Amino acid sequence: MYKNFATKLLFFALLLLSTLCSLKAQTAFRIVSKPIIFDAERRQLTLDYLEKRHGLKQSEPTIHPLMVVLHWTDIMSLEKTFDVFNRSTLPGARKEIASASALNVSSQYVIDRDGTVYQLLPDTVMARHVIGLNYCAIGVENIGSDQYPLTEAQLLANEQLIRYLKLKYPIEYVIGHYEYNLFRETDLWKESDSSYRTEKTDPGRDFMKRIREKIKDLNIKGVPDHK
């Protein structure tokens, strides 16, 4: 009798510990507001980008999110990344994309190496982060690079953020930045210049494989099926 009681007690203790760990993981997810400048200049440049690059003439610089695009920054500092995104216009060093627009690059979210999630723009305000898809894509930048792969804390934070966004919006796709070209032959693709493209590797194939394993229960698509 005592042996059975001890076994049951151990079972319930392990169940309680598992539940507490799960609750801790869930409650640890926080979004810290860290807004970049969105002044009249950036607003107008965003409206111009939507019209000239995506063929969408709008009165407000908003998007209807259908996709989450994961990136890495290639800048190993949250504050330096923020400084790069904070100005409304592209710095002179970005000549390879300046011909398309003077609008500065940015994203809606940045995730630091420790997994802290910072929100730079509202989910439904357009950020310039992925050719052909900005009008429907929420961008998530991660502090890291090819030399400094993304961390376990970032993996968890990306998973939690995707789950959060899936609850709010009809998210159909989660892709890595390096996969954006695979949408060129789909109805989602909107880019006025067919030759405008850049080669990307972020956020790494291994990271995308792992994040897709983590969110497979959400039944979100990866790259499109080409028939």
Image: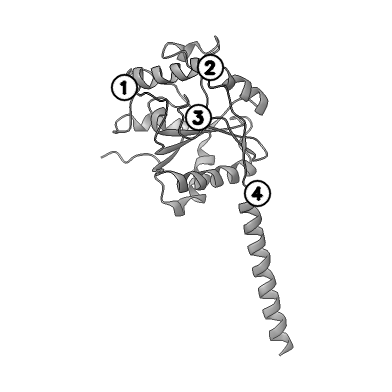
Say whether disc 1 or disc 2 marks the residue closer to the N-terminus: 1
Pointer 1 local density, CA inside 10 Å: few below 14, some 14–19, many at least 20: some
Residues at marks 1 and 4, CA–CA distance in whole angstroms: 40 Å
Residue at 36% over, 32% down: 182
Instruction: Give me the C-alpha separation between circle 4 and circle 2.
Output: 32 Å
48 with respect to 31 (left or right): left
Q: Earlier in the sequence, mark 3 or mark 4?
A: 4
Q: Secondary structure at mark 3?
A: loop
Q: Nearer the viewer, mark 3 or mark 4?
A: 4
One can see residue 138 in this view: yes
Element class at badge 4 = loop
- Image quarter of the C terminus: top left
Q: Quadrant of residue 142?
A: top right
Residue 77 seen: no
Amino acid type indicated by mark 2 = Ser
- Residue identifier under label 3: 201
Task: List the residue tagged with mark 4.
Answer: 28
Q: Who comes first in sequence, dot 1 or dot 3?
A: 1
For the residue marked with disc 4, what is the amino acid?
Ala
Residue 140 x %, y %: 53, 34
What residue is drawn where x is 48% and y is 43%? 165
Q: Which residue is mark 1?
A: 55
Circle 2 sits on which residue? 88
| Residue at disc 2, secondary structure | loop
**Residue 95 image position (x, y, % from top left):** 49, 10
Mark carried by residue 112: none
Is disc 4 in contact with disc 2, using a CB cutoff of under 8 Å? no
| Label 1: which secondary element | loop
User: What amino acid type is highlighted by mark number 1?
Assistant: Gly
Marks 3 and 4, how far apart in space?
30 Å
In the depicted structure, whether residue 160 falls above or below residue 126: below
